[in-house]
Image (cartoon, rainbow, N blue to C red):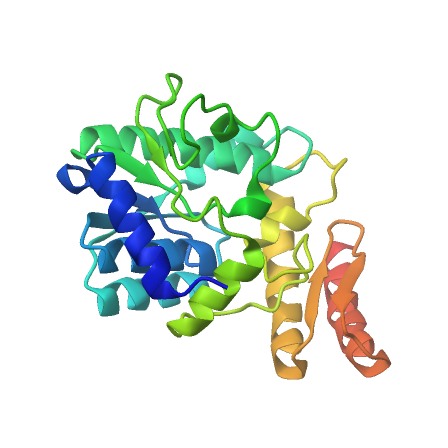
Amino acid sequence: MPSIREVTREIEAFSRTNGLYKKKILVLFSGGKDSSLVLYLLKKAGLDVSALTFFHRWSWRETLNWAMGFTKKLGVEHFLVDVTDGLLREAAGRKGPVCINCKKVMLWNAKWFALNNGFDVLAKGDNANDKIIGALLDQCKTDIRLCGLPKIGVPFFRPLIKYTAEEVEALAEEVGIKPHRMYEHARRRQWREGCPLQYIDREEIVTPELMELAYRVNYEVSKIARKRKVRVSVRVPSFEVMCWGCDSETLREVEFVIGRFKEDKR
């Protein structure tokens, strides 16, 4: 496993070779482990770095609060942008998953925020497990760590792209990065939390009411999950329960919560 010292030196060498010490870098900062580690490493490497966090009406407030505390402690400038209106324009009236539309909104907002505020480079927390063949950022013809994409107009720096999720986890552990967890089920076995809108059933037409339901149900079951240290999420409007490590008592509590929401819908 690489150490923080080794990874920092690698980032320093790459940054000197590619002129990044002369650039202003804006990290797309979700408050998760990967983007938190990127922010930490770029700051430690002495780069001119700031953070940009997008949120919307249904974002987890606890995660956002943790993210703001992390950047304050790190001494990094932190910008917050509400993308609720853009998300509604892109997602409402279409079938899920909402995440596809949300990422599109965030990507273009990041581009224009960077261009309008004097940033030269955007940075992301992608690791080696995030490389999907055919994805926009994997169409680079040069080093995949630094991609200049004509469609975006701002280069993307991905300092963790050659490290596996397991290595990133170990690096974050080494420096004590422990983001706030909502104890979501998520879509992968790894801690891969995001927002409750990912649990809208795939074939459903997305509406603001369905977005609100996804938030409210999953916020309530997250309290149970945190208390019992298991991972639970609920799809809506099917109310399908997804859980890692649930016992029968936990499932009864979750079903009780779901029952209240079912009654409200009648």
For this view, does 216 lie left or right of residue 47?
Answer: right
Q: Residue at x 52, y 60 (%)?
A: 167
Furthest residue in direction top, as rendered: 150
Q: Is residue 213 above or below residue 113?
A: below
Res 182 visible: yes
**Quadrant of the image occupied by residue 244:** bottom right
Residue 242: image location, x then y, percent: 77, 61
From the viewer's perspective, tell me whether residue 180 is left or right of residue 36: right
Picture coordinates of residue 228 (x, y %)? 68, 82
Q: Determine whether, in the image, residue 143 is placed left or right of residue 43.
A: right
- The answer to whether one can see residue 51 in this image is no
Q: Judge whether 169 appears above or below 133 on screen.
A: below
Q: Which corner quadrant of the image does residue 222 belong to?
A: bottom right
Give me the residue at 23% from left, 37% from top. Answer: 17
Q: Percent x, y for residue 42?
A: 27, 53
Residue at the (44%, 65%) spot, across then down: 171
Q: Nearer the viewer, residue 11 or 132?
A: 11
Instruction: Give the answer, above or below, for where 132 lies relative to 153.
Output: below
Q: Position of residue 46 (x, y in %)?
A: 18, 54
**Residue pushed farthest right?**
248
Which part of the image, by quadrant, shows the C terminus? bottom right
- Tally the marks: 0
Q: Closest to the observer: 150 or 239?
A: 150
Closer to us: 106 or 40: 40
Identify the residue at horizontal 21%, vertical 58% (top origin). Answer: 76
